[in-house]
Image (cartoon, helix red, strand yellow):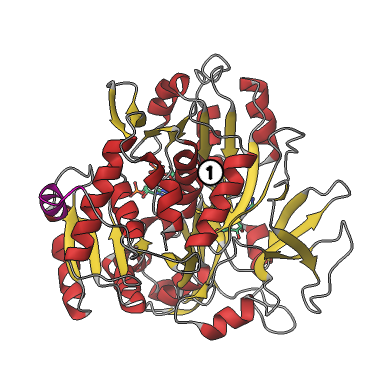
Amino acid sequence: MANPLYDALFAIHENKQNSFIIDPLSGTSLSYGHFVKQTAQFANVISDAGLVPGDRLIAQVGKSVSALALYAGAVRSGVVYLPLNTAYTTTEVEYFLQDSGARLLVCDTVSEAGLTPICKDHNAAVSTLSTDGKTGTLIDLVNNASDSFKTVDRSADDLAALLYTSGTTGRSKGAMLTQNNLLSNAQALHKLWQFCDKDVLLHALPVFHTHGLFVATHVCLLAGAQLIFEPSFDTDRIIKLMPHATSFMGVPTFYTRLLDQKNFNNDLARHMRLFVSGSAPLLADTHTLFEQRTGHRILERYGMTETNMNTSNPYNGERRAGTVGFPLPGVEIKVTHLDSSAELPTGEAGQLEVRGPNVFKGYWNMPEKTQKELRDDGFFITGDIAQIDADGYVSIVGREKDLIISGGYNIYPKEIELVLDHQPGVTESTVVGVPHPDFGETVVGVLVGRKDSINIQQIEAAIAESLARFKHPRQIIVVDSLPRNAMGKVQKNVLREEYRHLFNSAK
Ligand code: MCA
Ligand code: AMP
């Protein structure tokens, strides 16, 4: 047997001296061979902690080489990797801990005190890793662990990762991703986007989501390319580093922020061969402006946590602004009628459905939810409204699911509405997304209640207690009543229209 994902991504680099992680500004670098040794040390620590193949490991840690080695160590030891947004509060983390039954939680040193009690309640061990990945109880163990490890055998259908993507009903759903889901997608993208060992990817995405952890990192590992591994997206640093890179991946906010910088120009981008955008819609204007400024046409692609990447604009061929290109090789898509599920003719907008080796195994502990969204014939109902034009280009034209995407992060209104509905004086609430010049979309909370009995500051404090900062409504508005259709359903589209200019000038 073997461990297909580990073998393809990491084992191939054993004892190789070529650079993997580089920092051109400080001149430091880490070789592939050294990184592979680190994966063995992390794998030893994970198995010495008593985790066996199939167990879940939660990592709520800063972006560092150690965090990447922890992920690789989990894959190598057959343990299911469960990364969490570092912005999640203790309340949110407790849900993931309880739902996943994780045996070990690795958290930032600063969050240890807050998270230890809930780990005790849920029989999970705690280990710490500093934001820069250099200290913490985990590192103390790693530094004393052997740098050789017998990689655990895994099959292509075994789980490699569990990524939570919040649910429209408010409860986050754990997307079960197998070794082959991840490997097949990485291989398709590596080929399609022509990554090779001469590439240097400027990596500024978080590594607790699919885009940064799988799409960006896996294509580089398959290609033996180098990574400039930035802890976060800092526009000034990106501008300084870009002349040293060949490729860049980001959410639309990365691109609009770069375009806001006068000194971001074609000279900076002259070494670049590829700019990729995804996770949220890239406005056609941004695509056009970017080409005018740099001479590069951004390659937009479309994916989901449940499916990794589904479609991509071509590497060679027209990268059509406002579209997400064509299905990846091996991926099938169809657009179906929202009610009858009958396939619609070309050009008509409807539910986008996806089938292929990239489509997840289902939702963790949610067989009924899985049954509803993953058809028996293997097609996955995305909740995105799309249309395919006469040339075969796919456009995402809307969402059937109640979802706000802010700076590439997914926000599910239901989760916030559940908190708002329980606030003193609030008789009902609704949460909508409205355009935002920096984040693309942002959150607005609309409350019904007597103005004199609603305390906005108190409500904001309650939200801060239970929800990550990025989910907080940027504005809370109190109204007498909510617009409803004949069925009595709140008309969120009416509210989106009413408040669409709320943040026009905000930058
Ligand atoms: C930070 N804040 C945010 C966001 N990020 N608020 C709303 N939406 C956000 N996305 C908060 C901060 O906590 C801070 O709060 C305040 O906003 C201002 O922070 P700022 O400095 O402007 O933000 P930042 O720290 O620079 O972060 C913005 C960012 C970041 C760089 C765009 O959000 C980011 O890296 N997004 C990438 C997300 C991603 O990787 N998505 C891929 C998901 P305070 O008020 O306390 O200061 S995977 C996916 O979608 C599918 C699979 C796919 O197709 O890829
Ligand atoms: P996630 O919950 O992280 O899996 O987010 C996946 C969702 O992000 C998709 O269902 C789409 O709604 C959205 N998305 C991802 N890429 C794009 C894109 N290029 N254009 C429009 N929406 C996108």
- In this rendering, would 454 be left or right of 387? left
The amino acid beneath tag 1 is: Val
Q: Say which element carries label 1.
A: loop
The residue under the point 60% across, 82% down is 371
Q: Position of residue 169 (x, y in %)?
A: 52, 77
Q: Nearer the viewer, residue 271 or 417?
A: 271
Left or right position of 41 against 226: left
Ligand 1 lies under 8 Å from the Cβ of mark 1: yes
Which residue matches tag 1?
251
- Tell me where residue 478 appears, x and y as whole percent: 50, 68
Judging depth in this view, the residue of 344 and 330 nearest the camera is 330
Where residue 43 sits: x, y (%)?
A: 25, 57
Please give the range of residues in magenta.
Answer: 138-147
The answer to if 139 sits in the magenta stretch is yes
User: Residue 326: x percent and y percent?
Assistant: 74, 48
Is residue 421 highlighted in magenta?
A: no
The quadrant of the picture occupied by the N terminus is bottom left
